[in-house]
Structures are given as structure tokens and as C-alpha cells.
Amino acid sequence: MPITPHIVVQGAESAVAFYRDAFGAEELDRIPTPDGRLMSVQLRISDGMLHVADEFPEMGVLAPPTIGGTAVVLSLEVADAEAVFAQAIAAGGQVRQPLHEMFWGDLHGQLDDPYGHRWNVSQHVRDVGHDEIVAAAARAFA
């Protein structure tokens, strides 16, 4: 059974447009509330699903800017990381870590979206053995 992130933003309507422009998201369903907020917008991004919702402070449902950041990174593994990364930046994402070939064998970069969520974009470019990854991680974090 897959895990489907349900993220909270300030301005779900505009966030859905950003995810469409940045990552090619396709809207599958939405549930509005009588006051005009969106309880959930179901999106498909590549092979994955994402739900986006407005804040509901009265229920403790808060977006990253309200709580001072996020502890979660959403990851996309794509066939063309350079194209997807450039598209996301053009749509309004902010580079956090430029694309770079990493020691685990991926072309990898990280960006922040305009709604306080962090995204990894990666493309597998070479196979690396587990022991080699562990050794490289030890060097990187020494």
C-alpha cells in the first residue's frame, strides 16, 4: 500500500497551479469547503499521488510558514532531472542545492517551493554498491 503525502499550504488554489507548472501535476479531484477553502486537492505527479489542502488553524492543520518550517522533504525521481529542476525553478521554486551528481549515483538537487515545502529532484545515473555509499557517507559526514 503506497503512502500518499497530504501537505498543507497557505493558498491551495495557487499551490495546485504551481505544482502543475513545476512538476506537471494532474488534478484528479478536489473537495472545497463552504467558506472557499480547499480541504483536499488530489494530484498525480508522475506515478505518485499528492493531496494539497489549505490551512485550517481552527483544527490545528497548519502550513510550514505558520509553524516555522518543515521537517519533511518530498522526493521526485525523474527521467530528466535537469529539465524538471529547471521547470520547477522557472515556476517559482528556489534552489536550495543545485543539481549535482551525488555519491549514491543520482543527479540530485533540492528546492523550496513558494509554500514552504522542500523537494528533492533526482535522476539515477549510475549504480553504486552499498559499501561504497556507506564509505562515502562516512567521509561526507566526518
Image: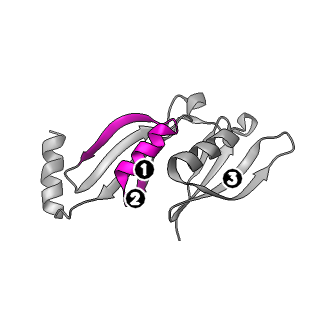
Going from N to C along the chain, the mark reached first, 1 or 2, is 2
Q: Are marks 1 and 2 in contact (CB under 8 Å)?
A: yes
Residue 97 is one of the magenta-drawn residues: yes
Q: Residues within 10 Å of mark 1 (few under 14, many from 20)?
A: many
Between the residue at mark 1 and the residue at mark 2, the CA separation in whole angstroms equals 8 Å
* The residue stretch that appears in magenta: 76-101
Q: Which mark is residue 35?
A: none
Q: Residue at x 50, y 65 (%)?
A: 47
Mark 1 residue element: helix
Name the quadrant containing residue 98: top left
41 in relation to 93, above or below: below
Q: Image check: 83 left or right of 127?
A: right
Q: Amino acid at mark 1?
A: Val
Q: Which residue is mark 2?
A: 78
In depth, the one of 139 and 112 nearer the eye is 112
Which numbered marker is on residue 41?
Answer: 3
Residue 18 visible to the viewer = yes
Quick check: is 99 in the magenta stretch?
Answer: yes
- From the top left corner, tell me how far across and down residue 58 is, in percent: 75, 35
Residue at image mark 1:
84
121, above or below 98, in the image: below
Q: Is residue 9 above or below residue 78?
A: above
Residue 72 in sight in this render: no
Q: Position of residue 27 (x, y in %)?
A: 66, 57
Furthest-right residue in view?
34
- Discs 1/3, front: 1
- Within-10-Å neighbours for mark 2: few <14, some 14–19, many 20+: some
Kindly report which numbered mark, 3 or 2, lies closer to the viewer in this rendering.
Answer: 2
Q: Quadrant of the C terminus?
A: top left
